[in-house]
Image (cartoon, grey):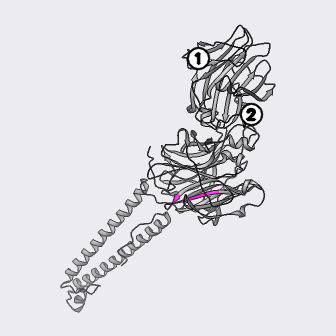
Amino acid sequence: MRWPYEQIGVTTARAFRNLLNKIIGDIGADMQEHKDRADNIQAQVDNLVADGDSSPEAAQARVGADGTNYTTLKQRLDAEHADVTTQLEDVTAQLAENTKVINRAKDKKVPLGGYLLPKDLNFKIKHKFRYFDLMPDKFIVLTDQFITNFNQFTTFATIHQLATPGVGNGLIQFTNSSDYSCIVKYNVAPAVPNVSSELTIKNFGGGTKDQDTVYIGLYKDESNYVHAWYNNRLNKVGFDAKVSGTLHASGIVSDIHLQPGVRIMFVLLENQVTLLSNDGNGWSKLSSWDLLGIVDFRDELTLSEYKYGFGVAGDAGTVISIDEFKGGYYGLVGVRDPNVVAWSDGVPYIKDNKLYLTMTCAGLPGGGGRRAIAAASFGVFTLDLTSYKLELIGKIYFKRNNVLMPDHAGNIVVDKDDGSFHVFISTWGDHWDTGWVNIGYGKTLENVFHGFNVIEDVQILNMQTKNSAYDPHALKINGEWVIGFIETTARFVPWGFFPSLVKGDLNNLVYVGGDRSVVVGDYTGCEGSKLQKIGDKWYLMAGQNTGDYRVYDLNMTYVTNLNVEPITPIPNAHPMVTPVPFRGKTKYIMPMFDVQNYNGDSTMGNFYVLEASETENGYEFPIRIPFT
């Protein structure tokens, strides 16, 4: 007898299948044994009845297989029948319980986990998208279509006489009997230095002297403003920054010809300004300028004093007309550094069939170096798991050294117990000033997913390395913080970078190890460290700039490479493998990006979703409903 049978207490599909097959085999063997015994007894009875025999053989038939001596043969048959019936009832009950286990898994209540190994997954490109949105609709905070004047702005002149604007019927118009100017300043200031504003020009004035100019920017007063301008008379664009009465000018570009109906946009990212135009065929960058050393919009007090606005300057008797003004926040021209938002135990954060993730939002200024890094920002996105529609829903800035930093390349962890938000970030915001990058950490009870948020009191974590550290991916595994990250030689000379791992309390992290073997020369190695569970086992993954995707265990021992369809141009890959529920199974996807820069700037890139052709029965992680 093999009864009693083992209880099902395993969570992986492989172990579950093996144990279930064993139980079924044991049940079959026991039932066959009972059948053989019953057949044997029945044969004896048949013989006795046929022969009318009450000889010693009949007495022998009254003795059970376990040695029990029954008074009559009927007593033995009845007892053993009752025993078999009881055992079969127990078997039926256990099979019913095992069926419940299976059904609960199918009903998405109990995870079965997976048995796939990283090397088993084969990722193919499923979706590609260029996310370009200079001012998303949900980021607009001010719109004026000049239906009527609600006294929502004030005016002042920068040169010549002040023109009093006329407002109504969908236009604001400026004119004067003398040469004139007028700045329209709204009573709305941006909260972070991530600004976009847009102006639609109905008509230029047609002046023949030197002024037929429109302005757009941020304004404090006559002595303090920053704006971009287009002079229709001279066909030039440029920037003015006036601080405490001192005028600075730069970014002048000639041979620019804009037509009535054109839209122009002013963008401020950190302390860098950009002017763009759109004649109906998409946005084109006209000029950019770095305000470093002139004014610091990272200072919250300074930024709060500058308001959205626009303006004009014209020759006497000319009329300049404006259709519409919008003010808000900048979106992006590309993405990089994808990280899936997760609960503290690693469960992907999914709400309404949308996976939450963070990525770096590429900025506009060209020239690489400080300008490209400081112009980027940390964005929060949702990814529809059916259509793969990507949507930017918020951004996060970080207060360090009493200024707002555009730090990026990090991840968000939602505490599964109290709902707080743990935010880990790379301190790229002041890298150009310090030459270093560190891992910053902040915690807040405020929901940081939507709108624009600031993490106060950022703590710099001691990653137990003398090198720079960036690209953190942190989770709590078995109740302990584990952080994968990239470390590189100090001040990036030469630039070799490799994946590393620490674990423990955030105030006392322990260095597990790093794989320096991936550095074979300047600007070589791995980036984009990612922690993920595959087949009920945790791994660290990172992407080489050769296009390989390396997988390590949590002792930083190399395991294998992922099989991934090549993306060109090859990114410094971030292999964000993510198990998601799909029709009773686990599907493995990988958000990714390339280095297809916008306008030649160091911005990166197109957004991709890759899918593994392999799926797993049941779920790698339990289904969890968000708090809100």
80 and 55: which is toward the camera: 80
Report the label total: 2
Image position, residue 582 (x, y; %): 50, 51
Instruction: Report the magenta stretch's main SS.
Output: strand
**Displayed quadrant of residue 602:** top right
Res. 402 image quadrant: top right
Query: As shown in the figure, which amino acid type bears the numbered disc 1?
Result: Phe
Work out whether residue 104 or residue 144 is closer to the camera in this orientation and state it.
144
Task: Say what amino acid the circle numbered 2 marks.
Answer: Trp
Is 339 above or below relative to 509?
above
Q: Any magenta on residue 482?
A: yes
Q: Mark 2 sits on what residue?
A: 289
Residue found 73% across the figure and 53% down from its top: 491
Q: Position of residue 464 (x, y in %)?
A: 63, 61
Residue 224: percent from left, percent from top: 67, 27
Task: Decide: few, some or many residues near mark 2? Use Cα within 10 Å; few <14, some 14-19, many ≥20.
Answer: many
Quarter of image, res 53: bottom left
Of the two numbered discs 1 and 2 on the same chain, state the one appearing first in sequence. 1
C-alpha separation, residue under disc 1 versus residue under disc 2: 31 Å
Q: Which residues are magenta?
A: 476-485
- Label 1 packing within 10 angstroms: few (<14), some (14-19), many (20+): some
Q: Quadrant of the C terminus?
A: top left
- Please state if 176 lies on the left or on the right of 107 as rendered: right
Residue lying furthest left? 71
Residue highlighted by disc 1? 146
In-front residue for pair 423/264:
423
Q: Residue at x 72, y 37 (%)?
A: 293
- Identified at 25% across, 75% down, the residue is 81
- Residue that sits furthest to the bottom in the current view: 56
